[in-house]
Image: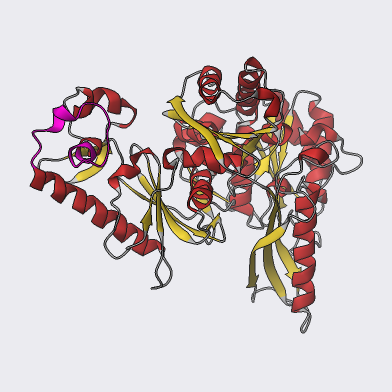
């Protein structure tokens, strides 16, 4: 059996799945400030036979929330290797003031970096790095983010720079290297690396809290955290790369919707307390954003599910003219909604008045006029249908799967979409999605593609992505390629093409001691640098 847990800002959802991916039990419990007691309560409600639990998969929004709030972040020394070419925009130049101030705004520009084909951009300067280390030490910084031009193509400069800095700074200093976070674009990759470095201390606290909760329940099975793309990372990887969890919430909800509905290609409407998030599944995985994404107003390089958020949720306030949202009572729903004895008309009250939900005390909304309720809910349906229509890429019929606790607002038929499904356990789809997360491997870099050799280069990239998934802990025979993207770069010589290949497979629990950390199939530690940079 596997346990899937999704720790949100308001609720902690949990689901117990059997070996055939059948949901055996599911529950919701309030998220607690200390995390541990909320997770413990959720697992207690599941009442799993602990000796039969083989793995626990957890999704969390804690790291993203910390960045948004600018709180609990560690000051970072951001070292960029790229002089003289990259001096125009220093590290964190376009960051919001709140987040930049929380991290201290410590940026360092040094020589180094590579061309797209791996040729040196400028020689690394050890003396310059030693002077940089002296300033980092003087400022008392203990977390360092190192980024270099085109390091996903040639990572040696980052390793060498980190080795020099670590020798000068001594023990107790954490390093985040940008090539570990992949993707070619410098600024977005650098931003992701800086954010990752700022979350390292918090990651240790969060991961230990999860481990403590499981220990209190006498669960000894390994636990994993889910990543942005719906794949898994183990405890050590989570401590080192907390930034990889940022989009796990919507990803888990959409993956859970795919399993619960049995549909691999559909639109998913995930309705919570404040928003309705709309995405599209292709082959059982969320369609991702076409380019870079944003986290707390900061450009980052990881791909996340393409999601359209509407200000409609179970806690959305309803105006006198029947307009719903975008203002919401959020987590105060059980205190302020009419059906719970409160004084504010919410979308949940409309659903109860219309007979779509049996929540709270229906007598408190008996005074709502039938026409008013119908008109308000019809407007909600129209807005959701408009959102789904905006997300689809063709006029072909597209099934709609409604999940989340607030999905009672979604009717059986939406305007223009006759096939609307609300599967069993729809309210804990995010926890189900966490429980079925797989192991991934990805390649994303610039290749030389000689004329007439495109198929050979693509085959090599596919093989590398599959190999990375296997190295990361996927079961042999279960790995498949789920996404291929190639973009010819006309401004570079030699048939340069950016190729991205993603492969996923089922977690092989029997091989956990033999493989690298489940994640994106990162390469083993470079000899001579030491494992200190991996954890």
Left or right of residue 473: residue 412? left
Residue 10 vs 459, above or below: the answer is above
Residue shown at 73% from the left, 35% from the top: 132
> What percent of the width, then of the height, locates residue 323?
17, 46
Q: Is residue 328 left or right of residue 426?
A: left
Q: Residue furthest top?
A: 216
User: Which quarter of the rendered picture does the N terminus lie within?
Assistant: top right
Residue 419 seen in the current view: yes
Looking at the picture, tell me which residue is in the foreground, 450 or 298.
450
In the drawing, does residue 441 fall left or right of residue 386?
A: right
Magenta-colored segment: predominant secondary structure: loop
Q: Quadrant of the C terminus?
A: top right
> Residue 289, image x and y in percent?
51, 58
Residue at position x 75%, y 64% from top? 462
Q: Is residue 106 magenta?
A: no
Which of 429/294 is in front? 429
> Can you name the residue that lies furthest to the right here?
528
| Residue at 17 percent of width and 38 percent of height | 353
**Residue 154 visible in the picture:** no
User: Which span of residues is magenta-colored?
Assistant: 350-369
Q: Give yes or no for residue 365 being in the magenta stretch.
A: yes
Residue 92 percent coordinates (x, y): 56, 43
Up the image or down, 463 lies above or below 88; here it is below
With respect to residue 260, does 333 lie above or below? above
Residue furthest to the bottom in view is: 452
- Residue at point 9%, 48% (across, down): 371
Using the rendered view, name the quadrant where residue 391 is placed. bottom left
How is the structure coloured here? secondary structure
Q: Position of residue 381 (x, y in %)?
A: 25, 53
Q: Nearer the viewer, residue 435 or 322?
A: 435
């Amino acid at each position: 059996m596997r346990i899937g847990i999704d720790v949100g800002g308001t609720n902690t959802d949990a689901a117990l799945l059997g070996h055939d991916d059948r949901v055996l039990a599911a529950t919701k419990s309030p998220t607690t400030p200390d995390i541990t007691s909320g997770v413990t309560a959720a697992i207690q409600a599941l009442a799993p036979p602990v000796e039969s639990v083989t793995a626990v998969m957890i999704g969390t929004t804690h790291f993203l929330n910390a960045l948004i709030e600018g709180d609990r972040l560690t000051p970072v020394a951001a070292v960029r290797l790229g002089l003289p070419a990259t001096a125009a925009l220093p590290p964190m130049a376009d960051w919001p003031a709140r987040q930049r101030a929380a991290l201290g705004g410590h940026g360092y520009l040094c020589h180094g970096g590579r061309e797209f084909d791996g040729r040196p951009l400028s020689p690394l300067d050890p003396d310059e790095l030693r002077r940089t280390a002296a300033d980092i030490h003087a400022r008392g910084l203990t977390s360092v983010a190192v980024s270099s031009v085109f390091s996903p193509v040639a990572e040696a400069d980052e390793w060498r720079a980190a080795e020099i800095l670590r020798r000068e700074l001594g023990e107790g200093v954490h390093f985040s290297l940008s090539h570990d976070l992949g993707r070619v674009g410098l600024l977005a990759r650098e931003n992701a690396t800086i954010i990752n470095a700022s979350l390292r201390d918090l990651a240790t606290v969060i991961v230990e809290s999860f481990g403590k909760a499981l220990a209190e329940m006498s669960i000894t099975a390994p636990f994993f955290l889910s990543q942005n793309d719906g794949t898994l990372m183990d405890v050590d990887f989570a401590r080192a790369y907390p930034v990889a969890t940022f989009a796990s919430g919507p990803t888990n909800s959409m993956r859970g919707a795919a399993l619960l509905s049995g549909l691999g290609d559909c639109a998913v409407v995930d309705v919570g307390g404040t928003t309705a998030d709309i995405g599209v599944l292709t082959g059982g995985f969320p369609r991702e954003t076409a380019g870079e994404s944003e986290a707390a107003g900061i450009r980052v390089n990881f791909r996340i599910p393409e999601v359209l958020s509407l200000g409609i949720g179970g806690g959305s306030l309803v105006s006198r003219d029947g307009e719903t949202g975008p203002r919401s009572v959020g987590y105060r729903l059980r205190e302020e909604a009419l059906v719970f004895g409160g004084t504010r008309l919410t979308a949940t009250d409309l659903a109860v008045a219309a007979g779509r939900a049996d929540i709270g005390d229906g007598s408190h909304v008996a005074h709502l006029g039938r026409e008013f309720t119908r008109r308000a809910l019809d407007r909600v349906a129209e807005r959701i249908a408009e959102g789904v229509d905006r997300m689809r890429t063709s006029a072909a019929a597209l099934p709609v799967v409604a999940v989340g606790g607030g999905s009672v607002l979604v009717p059986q038929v939406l305007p223009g979409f006759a096939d609307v499904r609300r599967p069993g356990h729809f309210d804990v789809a995010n926890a189900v999605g966490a429980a079925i997360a797989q192991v991934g491997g990805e390649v994303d870099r610039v290749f030389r593609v000689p004329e007439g050799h495109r198929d050979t280069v693509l085959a090599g990239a596919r093989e590398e992505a599959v190999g990375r998934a296997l190295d990361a802990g996927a079961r042999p025979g279960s790995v498949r390629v789920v996404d291929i993207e190639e973009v010819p770069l006309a401004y570079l010589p030699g048939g340069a093409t950016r190729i991205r290949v993603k492969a996923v497979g089922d977690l092989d629990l029997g091989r956990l001691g033999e493989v690298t950390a489940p994640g994106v199939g990162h390469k083993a530690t470079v000899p001579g640098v030491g494992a200190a940079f991996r954890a």
